[in-house]
Amino acid sequence: MKNFSLVTSQDRSYQLAIWEQRAIRVVLTACALLSVAITIGIIVMLMVHCRYFFLEVPWPQFFFGTKWAPLFEPRHFGVLPIIWGTLLVSLGACAISIPFGLGIALFLSEFAKPRTRSIFKPIIELLAGIPSVVFGYFALITITPALKIILPQTEVFNALSASIVVGIMTIPMISSLSDDAFRSIPRSLREAGYAMGATSFEVSFQVVLPAAISGVIASIILAFSRAIGETMAVTLAAGASPKLTLNFLESIQTMTSYIVQVSMGDTPHGSVEYYSLFAVAAILFFITLFFNIFADFVLRKTRISYI
Amino acid sequence: MDTSQHHYTGTFHSPLSQLTLRSTAPDLVADMSLNHAHAEITDKKNDLTQNLSVETTTTSEPITTGESQENSHTDSLLEVKDVTIHYGQNCAIKSMNLNIESNHVYAFIGPSGCGKSTFLRCFNRMNDLISGFKLEGSIKYRGQDIYSPLVDPVLVRKHIGMVFQKPNPLPTSIYKNIAWGPKINGLKVDYDELVETCLKKAALWDQVKDRLSDNGYHLSGGQQQRLCIARAIAMKPEIILMDEPCSALDPISARKIEELISELAKDYSILIVTHNMQQAARLSGHTVFMLKGEIVEHGPTHQLFSSPKHQLTTDYISGKFG
């Protein structure tokens, strides 16, 4: 019988390989830890600054106040108007991106020929690559003037124009994720529909869409959460007048555009308005976090495995 | 339908398929010739029952048998003529010819990739969904070419139902799985009753009657397949296509489905693709043996299995290849 040993070799190259593996493991773990550390760091930073803010402004006034005027005397720190502004723009954006996004996704996955699809899909995804400042200018110099022609009472800065432009920005998100969800539905399910004498329209809307509903809802929630966090386009298009209004044609202010406004001005370090930035940012963070967790929950809850 | 006028038709058709029959062949002439067709099938079937003891459809009457001998020509349920099928560059079926008579079970056997599933899926135009599919020739269903440009494939599928290899219930309730097809096709019936009869026919009613609102996916594999069969029946088709309906199931469920199929053969024309030669022998009256996109041999099942004409058939059924 041939001589052999299962004991670790003391050979130098073998030792080197072991160290190499360990080193790679450490570097990769560090990368993962770094992202976690940054997230935790941001949360801690937000919380610490929030504490200073709430030392000066009582929390009921902040959470339930209906007047937001932190930069001028007399100061008011009621956060509701800018939360409302944010929701108004985000809901308006969803009203545009959901029908268009789902329409595009259904078209791409159910009706488009492979060639058409290969042309359309990259173009639609290109929309996601356009910088949001560009979208802001697009809203300001194209959408708003167009709105003024139809509705003359439209203000220069208005929520509608911001909604439209954020809606356009989030279309690729919904169309792309929903398209993936539709395409993950196995062909056997579509065949089940067709075999029962359904038209392709009925199969798309009554078989494929309900079967993919978890992915579709998740894409909508993610798009909504993206709309909430959208900054530059909204700042440029919607203006900076915090208001509790239902009128889309008026100027409003969102949480993100308030942050831009304060960051750009010469707000003294350590002042109340300086700390208010962090309070607003914390609310933004928690709203977005909530929606992301919610999307995850919906995905888990409604997913059926078809395999 | 008036039973006194068509008393012998009544013995071969359930009331459901008579409805379909009338809609597709409304004139009396066509109806009469259909009866002759049935007579001949029944003749063959009696023959079969003696040899194979396959439990199939009802008894024949002497009058009809006599008539069938006078009229040698028959009107086919499905008539396949010079059918060639391509998927892109690949030829799947080569100039196929076959006549299929009604109220009969046809089994399609052959090794994997011989084109039997492709062939089966032609009858309800299910292959239209696959890109690159091209069919030459004609397939006539009761005299109408289903591949004519004027034909709506959706209408074809209302007459010719299908059960697939893998159970594929819709991701919705058991009730909706069955009621959906008739509903989108605007059937005016009592849906509760329809769901009950279909589930009873598919031998599933007793197991699910208390949980009709449950998702179809929560059933076991065999139950899912029976749900799919119930769903196909709900459309009141004349023909049911079955693409290896038992192959994804455990032996016990497969056996139950098989029993169900022989039960259904009394009311429907069934075309079944199967890997399992014993299954073909048990279920069918007619067997078609296919190889590399062509029919090698077809004929009454007992004949094909006991005294095959072709050497390839002998080799295949004796297990020399497959």
Image: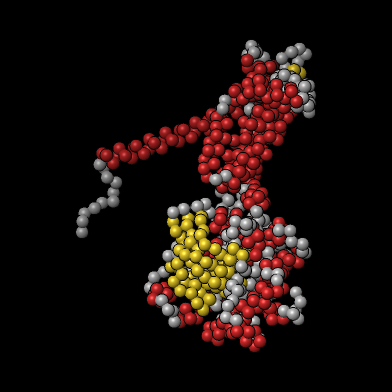
How many labels, in total? 0
In this picture, is A223 found above or below A203? above
> Residue at point 59% right, 76% down?
B74
| Residue nearer the viewer, B304 or B41 | B41
Q: Quadrant of residue B267?
A: bottom right
**Is residue A300 at all visible to an observer of this figure?**
no
Residue B210 in percent (x, y) is at 72, 65
| Residue nearer the viewer, A293 or B187 | B187
Position of the N terminus of chain A, as image quadrant, is bottom left
> Residue at point 59% right, 46% down?
A111
Q: Quadrant of residue B46?
A: bottom right
> Residue at point 56% right, 72% down?
B100
| Residue nearer the viewer, A260 or A104 | A104
Q: Report the coloring of the rendering.
A: secondary structure
Q: Is residue A56 left or right of residue A184?
A: right
Residue A70 in percent (x, y) is at 72, 17
**Is residue A151 at all visible to an observer of this figure?**
yes
In this picture, is A196 found above or below B15? above
> Residue at point 76% right, 67% down?
B193
Residue A34 in percent (x, y) is at 49, 31
Position of the C terminus of chain A, as image quadrant, is bottom right
Q: Is residue B170 left or right of residue B274?
A: right
| Residue nearer the viewer, A62 or B202 | B202
Q: Residue furthest bottom?
A: B62
Residue B47 in percent (x, y) is at 55, 85
In this picture, is A36 found above or below B27? above
